[in-house]
Amino acid sequence: MKAARVHAWGEAPRIEQVPDPAGGAGLSLVRMHAATVGHIDRSVWSGSFLRRPTLPYVPGVEAAGVVVRSSVFQPGERVWLRGAGLGIARDGTWRELVEAPDHALGALPSGVSFALGSAFFSPCTSAWVALHEVGHVHPGERVLVTGATGAVGSITLQLARAAGAQAVAVVFDDAQAGRLPPGTERIPASELRADAPLLIDTVGGAALPLALRGVAPGGRAVLVGYAGGTQAQLDLPELLQRDVALLPLNMLRREAAGRAAAPRLLQMLERGELQLAVTTFPLEEAARALEWIAMRGHAGRAVLTA
Ligand SMILES: NC(=O)c1ccc[n+]([C@@H]2O[C@H](COP(=O)([O-])OP(=O)(O)OC[C@H]3O[C@@H](n4cnc5c(N)ncnc54)[C@H](OP(=O)(O)O)[C@@H]3O)[C@@H](O)[C@H]2O)c1
């Protein structure tokens, strides 16, 4: 069986023949059709993640495929996989045959492609939980979203609109503004006024203090990511005087909420009510996909195909 395996932190994964998984109680075996390459995979691969797998390891926290054997799904059923330590505490999904704890699997509707089924969980459930469970979005509210050209940001905009909110993309340069879908309401970060009750920030870094200026006194700001930098300098007196609640999102801790929202989000994807761009790479090009997702201006999710 072919797999992409990492032998040293930050080193390009090697394509290798590895033994077929041994199987065991509580474990399902899935033939991988698509496996996502996301920012969390990059963090684990770089060695900077809080938890480190034992080297060498197979990365990949998410995938979609067809069941080979399982005690919870029938052979031949289409499934998505995510969590249960995949790609972090145990070998992950960048391999032809994926062994995963039964509870990592979920049913993939027939109208959702394997590529989308492998890529949807992180951006869609993160956006959902950020908006509804952390940010407590209300219909009619103005919601600022940074990183709206990215996977989480674009889904956040769409879900905010679906919740009846007025979703506004905060843009940091003309190139970013030009890559938003036609009709997207947008505002340059330099023109923000403190009038939005809710901010969802997926960029972090220097973008966070700029975007916080758009939050109304007493408002909420949900920090989702740090695609634009891991350090931010905040004006604490300003934050206190404007009484803005800065709320972190941690989807590893909120995995259950994400899984609970997954069926409804898959249904929206199936009906075309949610759009998520995916770019596919063959498994052999896992290293290129890892580089691609770190590039500014890439559109959507990277997915490996077997
Ligand atoms: N907290 C959690 O549990 C959780 C869950 C999921 C994701 N995340 C994090 O959320 C972040 C976004 O994920 P994603 O999948 O949406 O990433 P993505 O698809 O790569 O999108 C990144 C977005 O950030 C923008 N960006 C990057 N650097 C920037 C900068 N210096 N200034 C302004 N904008 C910048 C990009 O704009 P361009 O298009 O112009 O490059 C793009 O819109 C990542 O840090 C990820 O790790 C966290």
Image (cartoon, rainbow, N blue to C red):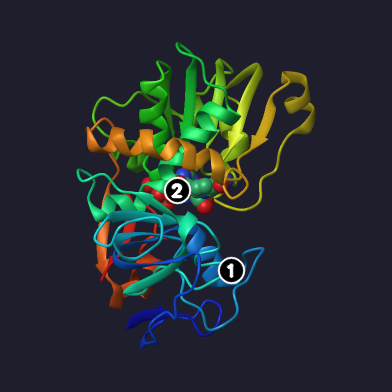
- Name the residue tied to disc 2: 122
- Name the residue tied to disc 1: 89
Dot 2 or dot 1: first in sequence order is: 1
Decide: is 288 above or below 135: below
Residue 81 lies, in percent from the top left, at 40, 57
Would the CB of label 2 be found within 8 Å of ligand 1? Answer: yes
Question: Relative to residue 195, is residue 16 drawn left or right?
Answer: left
Decide: is 190 above or below 7: above
Q: Who's the residue at 52% across and 76% down the image?
A: 10
For label 1, the crowd category at 10 Å Cα-Cα, with few meaning under 14, some 14 to 19 and many 20 or more, is: some
Going by the numbered disc 2, the residue's amino acid type is Ser
Residue 192 lies, in percent from the top left, at 52, 23
Q: Residue furthest left?
A: 111
Quadrant of residue 173 within the rendered picture: top left
Q: Nearer the viewer, residue 183 or 116?
A: 116
Disc number lying in front (2 or 1): 1
Q: Is residue 298 visible?
A: no
For label 2, the crowd category at 10 Å Cα-Cα, with few meaning under 14, some 14 to 19 and many 20 or more, is: many
Quadrant of residue 254 within the rendered picture: top right
Give the position of the C terminus as an image quadrant: bottom left
Q: Is residue 131 visible?
A: yes
Q: Nearer the viewer, residue 123 or 255?
A: 255
Marks 2/1: CA distance? 18 Å
